[in-house]
Amino acid sequence: MNCGIDRFSNEKKKELSIKNSGCGNPFYGKTHSEDVKKFLSLPKTKEHVDKIALANTGKVRSEEYKKKMSEKMKGKKHSAEHNIKISLSRKGDPRTKTRQGIPWSDEQKKKCRISHINRRNLLYGGADGVMYPNIGLGENEYFIKLELEKGWDGIYHGKSNKQFYLSELGYFVDYYEPTLNIVIEYDETKHYDKNWNLKEKDVIRQREIKNYLKCKFYRYIKPLQKFYEV
């Protein structure tokens, strides 16, 4: 096993590349048998992947190689047929569970969501190191008016320049009143179907937040100007 140690110099590699190209290659003009092709198309096991990773540990592509490959691939795009072929080849691969029709569990979704937010915070966080979702048009004005009417004192972007973040769930909420333990979501059309039924992903999110905070949960549908408790 190589284990990261390069056995040949660049000059030797170049010599071998020239020597084994075209008709100089021992496999020139030959094809794999159907059994070999079938074996090569089998999904890679974790042990096989780990073995390849270990063999490549410590290897670094030279700048010359990177430049050469960059020039070679410039302007090139995979054809639709190629993409379909790649997609089919990955079916059954243990590393791509969703391609087998196996849905992600709620726990897997939560871990991915939190990881994504943490990564975005690290890359794009503002002065406080936190990245926040987009704020709905008219959202801040609505919560200012609501607080004047209700006498509430909550956390929302227009007042705190941030939204309340549930780090354990990976969710931001539009409005949170900590004293009264109230959550309000300011909904635009995209959260509902054509019959104004809340979409499934929003229902799941709503249920998770309610169960975690044990809070009162309200929604405001902007197009209908409807405020209601869930």
Image: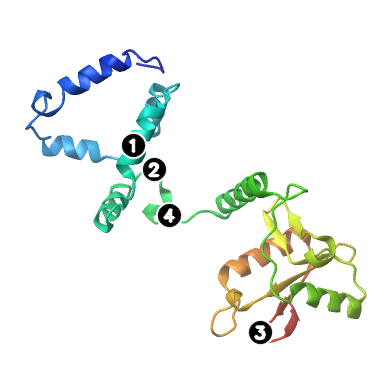
Give left or right: position of 44 versus 38: right
Badge 4 vs badge 1, beta-carbon distance below 8 Å: no
Q: Earlier in the sequence, mark 1 or mark 3?
A: 1
Question: What residue did someone put label 4 on?
Answer: 102
In space, the residues marked 2 and 4 are separated at their CA atoms by: 11 Å
Say which amino acid is labelled 3: Pro
Residue 70 position, x and y percent, is 36, 39
| 158, 92: nearer the viewer | 158
Badge 3 vs badge 4, beta-carbon distance below 8 Å: no
Give left or right: position of 225 versus 65: right
In space, the residues marked 1 and 2 are separated at their CA atoms by: 30 Å
Say which amino acid is labelled 2: Pro
Q: Earlier in the sequence, mark 2 or mark 3?
A: 2
Question: What residue did someone put label 2 on?
Answer: 94
Picture quadrant of residue 189: bottom right
Residue 40 position, x and y percent, is 23, 36
Residue displayed at 88% across by 75% down: 147
Quarter placement of the C terminus: bottom right
Question: What residue did someone put label 1 on?
Answer: 69
Question: What residue did someone put label 3 on?
Answer: 223
